[in-house]
Amino acid sequence: MAKHKLSHSNQRRYFARFYLEAIEKAKEDETVINRKALLAAHQQSCLFHLMGAYQAFIWEVAQTYDENYSANQSLDALLKQAQLNGKSIPELERVLTLELAEDSWLNRMQNTWKQINEVNPDATTQTKESVNLNAIEVRVISEVDEFAQLHDWYEKLSELIEEIRQLLGEW
């Protein structure tokens, strides 16, 4: 694990890229038993690391402005806290705009993460009929397969992180 928080978002992106490669390999390998379960595990792991990279990045920017941030704190709450401390964090205000826009990649990524972590998975999923009693049961999300966007989310998150780091490095 990364010893320095500043490298934590880089490490999480590395792990996400690792899972993206594992997803591609699993899709190509017809011999894998329970391939759908393996793909679901890799997809959720990839999303877990993308969300971790996002949260570590928010922490990184907050630390640049000497603001405290914890992963269970919303970005909106962080910005309100900064405002109460007499600070403006324009880089995170831009990220919040992305987070709140319903058609944005960041909003879709966060909603997919929330959906797979819901307490009642039956509310938004359908159980797939079991063909093999020894097989792992896989829940299939009934809406559009958001996991198809993992590569895009990885690329856009990486671009966002690098762009804002560049802006922070200029001042």
Image (cartoon, rainbow, N blue to C red):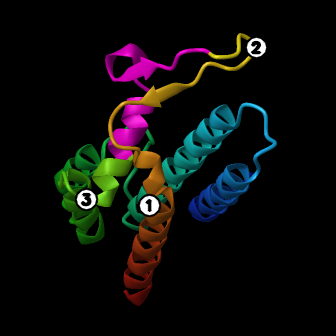
Q: Nearer the viewer, residue 157 or 69?
A: 157
Q: In the image, 94: left or right of 121?
A: left
Q: Give the crowd class for mark 2: few <14, some 14-19, many >=20 residues within 10 Å.
A: few
**Mark with earlier residue (1, 2):** 2
**Which image quadrant is residue 6 in?**
bottom right
Q: Which residue is mark 1?
A: 153
**Mark with earlier residue (2, 3):** 3
Circle 1: element type: helix
Q: Which residues are magenta?
A: 110-130
Circle 2: element type: loop
- Residue type (three-letter) at the residue carrying disc 2: Asn
User: Is residue 119 visible to us here?
Assistant: no
Q: In the image, 3: left or right of 159?
A: right
Percent position of residue 153, x then y: 44, 61
17 shown above or below 108 = below
Percent position of residue 48, x then y: 55, 43
Percent position of residue 18, x then y: 70, 58
Q: Which residue is mark 2?
A: 134
CB contact under 8 Å: marks 2 and 3: no
Q: Nearer the viewer, residue 62 or 131?
A: 131
**Which image quadrant is residue 14 in?**
bottom right
121 shown above or below 25 = above
- Residue type (three-letter) at the residue carrying disc 1: Trp
For this orientation, the residue located farthest to the bottom is: 170
Percent position of residue 151, x then y: 51, 63
103 shown above or below 157 = above
